[in-house]
Image (tube, helix red, strand yellow):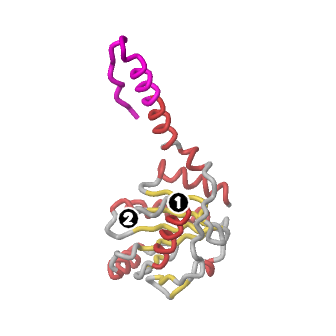
Amino acid sequence: MHLPAPPILPETRHSSSRRHLLVTGLAFSFSACTKDSPTQSSERKASAIVVPTDLYLQNILAGAFTLKQLGGKAVLLELWATTCAICVAEMPMISALSERYEVRGLRTVALAMPYDRPDHVLHYAQARRLPFPIAVDPAGHMLKAITRQAAQYGEPSVEGTPTRLLLNPFGQLLYQEQGALNFGGKTLESQLLKLL
């Protein structure tokens, strides 16, 4: 990341201001570098957020189910929308990760956002035939539960799509990633390797 150089101040009378700008600029540069570092996100402590695993979701191609009923050692909950170009483009990568780690105990669910039209989700699910449930929750119960806990514990909430939540079997949020897959999915895969 390229940061603009601090303004050059005359040496006289403003030397303390120049030092302050230099220290502030260095601190900003350091925080910007560590913020985007993949090692920082992978070393983050587990969240206090617990996603409700007994909440019923509707598989758009089958019946209602809960995350608890999926079994397995971990759940990858992909929050997406048919109107999200990144979500749709990256679904094959999510599918490949899901298939690769299913034998180790990963269960994957693509949960459409409450504003997504169920007929659009159904059309997408029928056309793609992905190897995991594509679910809807029109009332947004799952999203509300996550948002409420994020506010309660002062943690990042779901701010858009796509958002990936990696959960242990009890629903505890272990890793969260928003936006495009970091490094083509390598960051998420490193989390899966730790957990599985």
Could you tell me which residue is drawn at 37 percent across and 69 percent down? 81
What's the distance in space between the residues labelled 1 and 2, CA to CA? 30 Å
Vertical arrangement, residue 24 with respect to residue 155, above or below: above
SS class, disc 2:
helix
Nearest to N terminus: mark 1 or mark 2: 2
Residue position for label 2: 88
Residue 116, horizontal then vertical, whole percent:
35, 75
Start and end of the magenta stretch?
1-25
Question: Eyeballing the image, is 3 above or below 98?
Answer: above
Mark 2 packing: few (<14 Cα in 10 Å), some, or many (20+)? Answer: some
The foreground one among 140 and 21 is 21
Checking the image for residue 154, the label placed there is 1
User: Measuring 36% from the left and 25% from the top, which residue is drawn there?
Assistant: 6
Find residue 193 and report its image quarter.
bottom right
In-image side of 56 versus 19 (left or right) = right
Count residues near mark 1 (Cα–Cα under 10 Å), then give few for <14, some for 14-19, many for 20+.
few
* Residue furthest to the bottom: 63
Where residue 151 appears, as percent x and y from the top left, is: 50, 65
- The kind of residue tagged 1 is Gly
Q: 83 left or right of 99? A: left
Q: Amino acid at mark 2?
A: Val
Residue mark closest to the camera, 1 vs 2: 1
Q: Is residue 13 magenta?
A: yes
Residue placed farthest to the top in the image? Answer: 12
Viewer-nearest residue: 1 or 84: 1
Q: Residue 92 is drawn in which quadrant?
A: bottom left
